[in-house]
Amino acid sequence: MDVFKGRKLACGLAALVALGSSSAFAGAWTNPAGNAASFSYSNGQDINGLFGDPSVFGDGLFFQTSFLANASNGATQSLTDTVSFDVVANPGLSFSSLSVQAFGSYSVTGDATNSVDVDALLSMDENGGLLRHFDDALTTNVSFPVQGESSGLFDGSALVDIEFVFPTPSNDINISLNNNILAISTAGGSAEVNLNFQNLNIGFGIIPEPASLSLLSFGAIALVRRRRS
């Protein structure tokens, strides 16, 4: 538990150093629009207030999340929330990736009818262009749901990699992160799961100049000709 508490404290300090502490409430962020190193953002909102306001540092957003489901002696508790915002890349840049890291703890007592579950999805949708949708589910080093007597720590991550998507994705996108956790207990048993999200990071690549694209096309044609000869 000391390791978990230390990591949680480190994450909280990183958020405070960035742009100030978060406040957990539903609806629009306190600052729903602003600028980061490589993008501008707008329409920031949190449906149920469990993500809260993020702090922005570089091209990352830091959340002080409040996902803790706790059930005992026949009770069930589930928590769900979605945070979303629009992002426009700075001139000359294109989106290449979107990633998020998470960590947490869980504890289950009793038989296999007591359990905890974690389910999160990171999504990226084009606001223009081809209006494509990209997503990736949170993968953890513990297999959920966890049923029966068990406890421990876990890490998780999700990655949306669009670096080699063609045509190049729009420079205007919507990002959303949905999270669901569940704790189920029966008489005499208990279940608890705690999940915190760390850095939600947006990656960028430089859009090639027209001259560079022409050289790349010429090189590809020359390579095909050499293979045919």
Image (tube, rainbow, N blue to C red):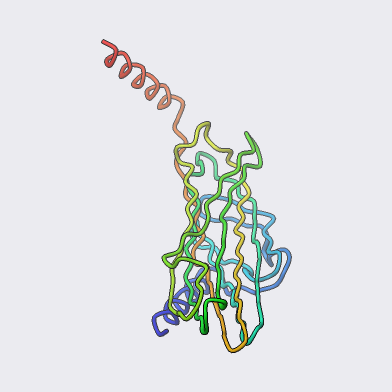
78 on left or right of 155? right
50 on left or right of 215? right
Q: Furthest residue to the top?
A: 229
**Residue 152, image x and y in percent?**
43, 78
Residue, x 56% and y 81% (percent of image)?
191
Which quarter of the rendered picture does the N terminus lie within? bottom left
Q: Is residue 111 above or below residue 123?
A: below
Foreground: 144 or 24? 144
Residue, x 56% and y 45% (percent of image)?
134
Residue, x 53% and y 55% (percent of image)?
137
Foreground: 47 or 188? 188
**Residue 206, image x and y in percent?**
45, 40
Q: Is residue 18 above or below residue 229?
A: below
Q: Furthest residue to the right?
A: 27
Which quarter of the rendered picture does the C terminus lie within? top left
In the picture, residue 216 is in which quadrant? top left
**Residue 226, image x and y in percent?**
27, 15
Q: Furthest residue to the bottom?
A: 188
**Residue 79, image x and y in percent?**
65, 71
Total marks shown come to 0
Foreground: 91 or 12? 12
71 on left or right of 47? left
